[in-house]
Image: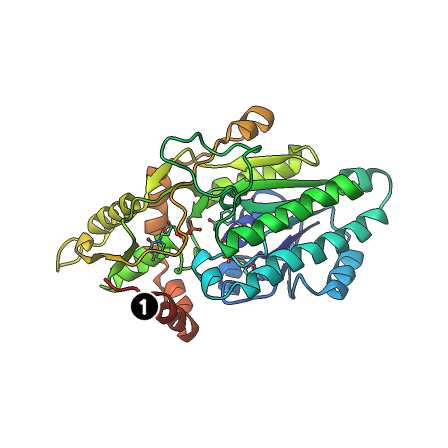
């Protein structure tokens, strides 16, 4: 079996669901169920014996040792993290704890377990670390896209904590020989995306007739990848990647935020027209994010050249699927928009003058 951390979050849950659709190999899913973890994401595999869920913290070394000894996974895929830049600005401590100390604790537990393996099982073991393009910092408008050798220059508490975790993973390979791989991926979107992030927030707000808060001038650029393509990239690296290597993963789809929001409004106008007029009337420019990175872009040629991976979805197909999913899963959205979520909206948006 494989051990997945953070498999009740957005990407982790998509990964677990895709894994169980495409393979018979069981998954041990360790997730602390923070505000971002949601067992509803895994409801479709609730009765599946191949999915073993454990609620627990990656900082809990004793738990990690027990799970590894008991379940003897052949690989670890590490998603668990605090993942939202705006939350990292309001409360960076959780990011250092989970992303840095948690990754360190998991690496140490994995190293102890791996050293006890022998023969094929030791050679074949993999620790895959899921990271982000944000560790590379911000690009100018004409700079080439990030390659795997781009210097690290993280600018937010989130990206700094992910950069630290990447360095730990790298060091555990060079110093101890732990067979690690790392992927640095661009912005994901798709089903089960928590509505604190740009795309699901805009869909949820539009359907509720609320303002669509665009930070600053809305010209910040991100590269967007449909989540199932990220999952297939991770499966590819796990199967064919070389230990010690880093793979950048992206969708070849750079877009300014305002164009993302306009695209969502146009799709909603088509699929769920509002009698009061186009959803674009709700677009509202608000105060910018402090330290807001201007542009990210991923050069994903290495993973294509060496491992044969390319995204299956275009932005047009992926974003349509996403909007259709949100319209069909309004109950999921309603459950997620709980009291705690409303407090976050107050914390993040109340001080942003229009
Ligand atoms: P998410 O916030 O939706 O999910 C994170 C999951 O980790 C949640 O289920 C949460 O309960 C769990 N978790 C948090 N702290 C934990 C702890 N201490 N112990 C155990 N579980 C814990 O995040 P996501 O968007 O699914 O991102 C997953 C990974 O992918 C992260 O490492 C993130 O940095 C990386 N990533 C995300 C994106 C993106 O666009 N979302 C892009 C590139 C890389
Ligand atoms: P987000 O989804 O938080 O991802 P990240 O910060 O990791 O790239 O934000 C994507 C972009 O959208 C980012 O440039 C910030 C911007 N944004 C807004 O303009 N308004 C919002 O309400 C949010 C949440 C994000």
Residue at x 62%, y 43% (from the top left corner): 23
Q: Which residue is mark 1?
A: 351
Q: Which image quadrant: the C terminus? A: bottom left
Farthest-out residue, bottom: 339
Residue 14 % position (x, y): 51, 50
Residue 120 relative to residue 19: left or right: right
Residue 304 % position (x, y): 53, 27
How is the protein colored in the picture? rainbow
Residue at x 29%, y 48% (from the top left corner): 218
Label 1 crowding class (10 Å Cα cut-off): few <14, some 14-19, many 20+?
A: few
Residue at x 44%, y 45% (from the top left corner): 187
- Compared with 142, 238 (above or below) is below
Residue 309 relative to residue 244: left or right: left
Residue 231 % position (x, y): 53, 43
Given residues 224 and 132, the one toward you in this image is 132
Residue 144 % position (x, y): 44, 29
């Amino acid at each position: 079996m494989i051990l997945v951390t953070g498999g009740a979050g957005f990407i982790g849950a998509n990964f677990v669901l895709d894994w169980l659709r495409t393979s018979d190999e069981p998954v041990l899913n360790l997730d602390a169920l923070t505000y971002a973890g949601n067992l509803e994401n895994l409801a479709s595999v609730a009765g599946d014996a191949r999915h073993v869920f454990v609620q627990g913290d990656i900082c809990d070394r004793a738990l990690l040792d027990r799970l590894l000894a008991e379940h003897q996974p052949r690989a670890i895929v590490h998603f668990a993290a605090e993942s939202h830049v705006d939350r990292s600005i309001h409360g960076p401590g959780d990011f250092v704890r989970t992303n840095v100390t948690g990754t360190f604790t998991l690496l140490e537990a994995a190293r102890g377990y791996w050293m006890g393996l022998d023969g094929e099982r030791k050679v074949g073991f993999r620790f895959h670390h899921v990271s982000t393009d944000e560790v590379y910092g911000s690009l100018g408008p004409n700079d080439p896209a990030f390659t795997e050798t781009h210097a690290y220059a993280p600018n937010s508490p989130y990206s700094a904590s992910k950069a630290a975790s990447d360095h730990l993973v790298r060091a555990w390979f060079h110093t101890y020989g732990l067979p690690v791989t790392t992927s640095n991926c661009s912005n994901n979107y798709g089903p089960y995306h928590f509505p604190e992030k740009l795309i699901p927030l805009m869909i949820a707000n539009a359907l509720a007739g609320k303002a669509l808060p665009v930070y600053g001038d809305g010209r910040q650029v991100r590269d967007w990848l449909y989540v199932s393509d990220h999952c297939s990239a991770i499966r590819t690296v796990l199967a064919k990647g070389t230990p010690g290597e880093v793979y950048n993963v992206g969708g070849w789809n750079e877009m300014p935020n305002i164009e993302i929001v306009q695209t969502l409004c146009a799709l909603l106008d088509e699929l769920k027209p509002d009698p009061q007029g186009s959803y674009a009337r709700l677009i509202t420019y608000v105060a910018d994010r402090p330290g807001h990175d201007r542009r990210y872009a991923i050069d994903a040629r290495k993973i294509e050249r060496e491992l044969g991976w390319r995204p299956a979805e275009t932005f047009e197909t992926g974003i349509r699927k996403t909007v259709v999913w949100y319209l069909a899963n309004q109950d999921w959205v309603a459950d997620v928009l709980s009291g705690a979520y409303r407090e976050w909206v107050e914390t993040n948006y109340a001080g942003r003058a229009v």
